[in-house]
Each structure stands twice: as C-alpha cells, then as structure tokens.
Amino acid sequence: GAGVSQSPSNKVTEKGKDVELRCDPISGHTALYWYRQSLGQGLEFLIYFQGNSAPDKSGLPSDRFSAERTGGSVSTLTIQRTQQEDSAVYLCASSQRTEYNEQFFGPGTRLTVL
Amino acid sequence: GENVEQHPSTLSVQEGDSAVIKCTYSDSASNYFPWYKQELGKRPQLIIDIRSNVGEKKDQRIAVTLNKTAKHFSLHITETQPEDSAVYFCAAPGGFSNDYKLSFGAGTTVTVRA
C-alpha cells in the first residue's frame, strides 16, 4: 500500500519568506509526527498529532513554526519568516497508535533558506 | 525529558565482522527502544525494537540487548555486509506519560569495507 508521502521534496526559499510543507500519512494512522534533521545530525522531534489535536507542541523551535492537521489525515507544517538556520530536512512519520508503534517515515522535504 | 546518547558516531568494519552500537537513556520509565536505519538519501526505517519486558531480541543478523538497570541498550550486527552501510539511530520514548515522543540518538555512520 501507499506509504507516507511529503511534498515538496525540495524547497528553496529566500530568507524572510513563509513556507508550507505537506505530509500525507498512511491511511488509518491516527498518530502523526514531524521531525527535523539537520545535515549529519539526528532527528529532532517537533510536534505530534493524535487525530487532529496536537497535545505536545513543545518541540517547535520558535513561534515562527506552526502545524495543523485536518480530517485526521493531511498535516501542514508552516514556517513563517524563514531563517537560514531553518535549513534542514523535515521528516514526517505516522503510526497506528502512539504507544509501542512503529513510526513510518516519509521521504522528507529538504528546505534550503538562502 | 528523555536524553539519549549514542556511541560511536562512526564505525568502520571489515565485511564479515560484527558491529556494535551502544545507547544510553536517562528516563527510567522508558519502556520501548526502537532502532532505525537510514541509508544515504533515504528515509529512516525501523529494523528492530525491544520492549522493557525482555533483555534481548534477535532477527537474523541483528540483535538488540537491553539493560534497564544500567539504562543502556545496544545493537549488534553480525556477519556484516556492504548493504549494512548506513546511519543507525537508536531512540527511546519520553517515559510513562510521553511514550509517543521518541528522542533519537545522534546516529552512528556504519561503513562496511569490502
């Protein structure tokens, strides 16, 4: 079946512009996660959704970052007034539940802020 | 929150030899420890996980051990092959009330020399 998909695969933007990153989770997966991976680094947790609600937003780096999920499916991560330090690969993952469940990752969106 | 440390950061082994990666965690309530493999330019994929009610788990050439008293767990790859070359990440959840939030180690780049 279809896995987690993300779009765009690559995004180049200028400093100060807003960007939207999209994630389509595996159908039926109620939990959705956003991570950030800087070059050569590990995965930094940003936010997770259970259904449409986001109980924990503590991983978002600043108030320029926001995310929403509609219909218990698609999620959008928005970064306002992008900065060069936002450049990274943004990974989305989904799982059937939150506890003890394999997280299936999408291919990521590589964001470059010039 | 959970703090996961992973060693070594890089590991070069001769084909056929074994590779061992070690991780420590801080939250004694953590009870689920997955390992992800990320090939160059690809998404992370779960290769094995272990729950706190067992001390060791094997799947063909890979095995994971868990020592809850010492709060560390390890990945063992035997009879390494070139396709084992990748970055490996360990992870641990945030404990009893935060088991959805995986904290990842910084990763180990494994290179298998032919």
Image (spheres, rainbow, N blue to C red):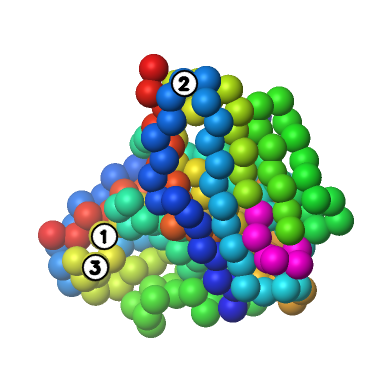
* Residue A70 appearing in the image: no
**Amino acid, disc 2:** Glu
For the record, the magenta segment spans B68-73
Mark 1, secondary structure of its residue: loop
x, y percentage for residue A43? 46, 58
Residue B91: give its label: none
Mark 3, secondary structure of its residue: helix
Distance of label 2 from label 3 (alpha carbons): 38 Å
- Please indicate whether residue B87 sits to the left or right of residue A86 in the image: right
- Label 1 packing within 10 angstroms: few (<14), some (14-19), many (20+): many
* Disc 3 to disc 1: CB gap under 8 Å: yes
Distance of label 3 from label 1 (alpha carbons): 5 Å
Majority SS type along the magenta span: loop
Which residue is denoted by mark 3 in the rendering? A85
Residue B15: give its label: 2
> Does B69 appear in magenta?
yes
> Does B34 appear in magenta?
no
- Please indicate whether residue A88 sits to the left or right of residue B11 in the image: left
- Label 2 packing within 10 angstroms: few (<14), some (14-19), many (20+): some
Distance of label 2 from label 1 (alpha carbons): 36 Å
Which residue is denoted by mark 1 in the rendering? A87
Residue depicted at 52% across the width and 26% down the height: B17
